[in-house]
Image (cartoon, grey):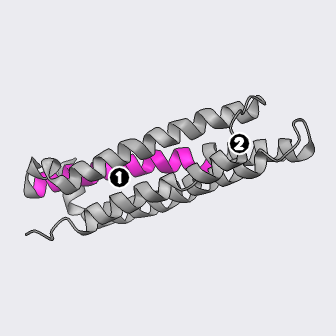
Amino acid sequence: MTDFLVAHFNLVRGLHILAVIAFMAGMLYLPRLFVYHTQAQPGSQMDETFKVMERRLLKGIINPASIATAVFGLGLILADGQIRGWDFLLQPWMVAKLAALVGLYGFHGFLSASRKRFETGENVRSEKFWRMVNEIPFVLAIIIVISVTTKYLNH
């Protein structure tokens, strides 16, 4: 398996990047939908429309893209470990990236639970709250991208 990943490293990296783009697009859009959903009258046509949009976004884009991101990311880790050795997992850039990923996947879980609360009419969060947390995925993406793109600055 690792031989395949090493031989097709650039393909796996490309698929990982595409999955990340889809994952991040959804993670940035879902809280924005929540901002507008808080303004909809419960039981109204708009409320029902937002419920459908949020469910489809989460189940049709965010969840599959998050799985693909993780699978291709693990493939890259396995290939990189095979090529360069496993000590890169303890490098500061990788520790920072993995910590930000834990935060991103945790936020994904929070958004999933929040979508269910909107679905059942139990949302207690304000429009202002959703506007503020809408920035969290982008801040985490900055940490992840800067960690990876500057990993060789000290070498």
Q: How many labels were placed on the picture? A: 2
Asked whether residue 4 is in view, the answer is no
**Residue 114 spot, x, y in % from top left:** 63, 35
The reply to whether dot 2 and dot 1 touch (C-beta < 8 Å) is no
**Residue 2 spot, x, y in % from top left:** 19, 49
Image quarter of residue 106:
top left
Residue that extends furthest to the front in the rendered view of this protein: 128
Q: CA distance from mark 2 to mark 1?
A: 36 Å
User: Which residue in the structure is indicated by mark 2?
Assistant: 126
Instruction: Please rate how many residues cluster around mark 1, counting C-alpha atoms within 10 Å: few if below 14, some from 14 to 19, many from 20.
Output: many
Residue 60 sits above or below residue 116 on the image = below
The secondary element bearing badge 2 is classed as: loop
The residue sitting at 59% across, 52% down in the picture is 132
Query: Which contiguous range is marked in magenta?
Result: 60-83
The residue sitting at 69% across, 31% down in the picture is 117
User: Which residue in the structure is indicated by mark 1?
Assistant: 72
Dot 2 or dot 1: first in sequence order is 1
Image quarter of residue 113:
top right
Instruction: Please rate how many residues cluster around mark 2, counting C-alpha atoms within 10 Å: few if below 14, some from 14 to 19, many from 20.
Output: few
Residue type of the residue flagged with mark 1 = Phe
Q: Quadrant of the C terminus?
A: bottom left
The residue sitting at 48% across, 59% down in the picture is 138
**Residue 18 spot, x, y in % from top left:** 45, 63
Residue type of the residue flagged with mark 2 = Ser
| Drawn side of residue 148 relative to residue 129, left or right | left
Q: Nearer the viewer, mark 2 or mark 1?
A: 2
Q: Is residue 131 magenta?
A: no
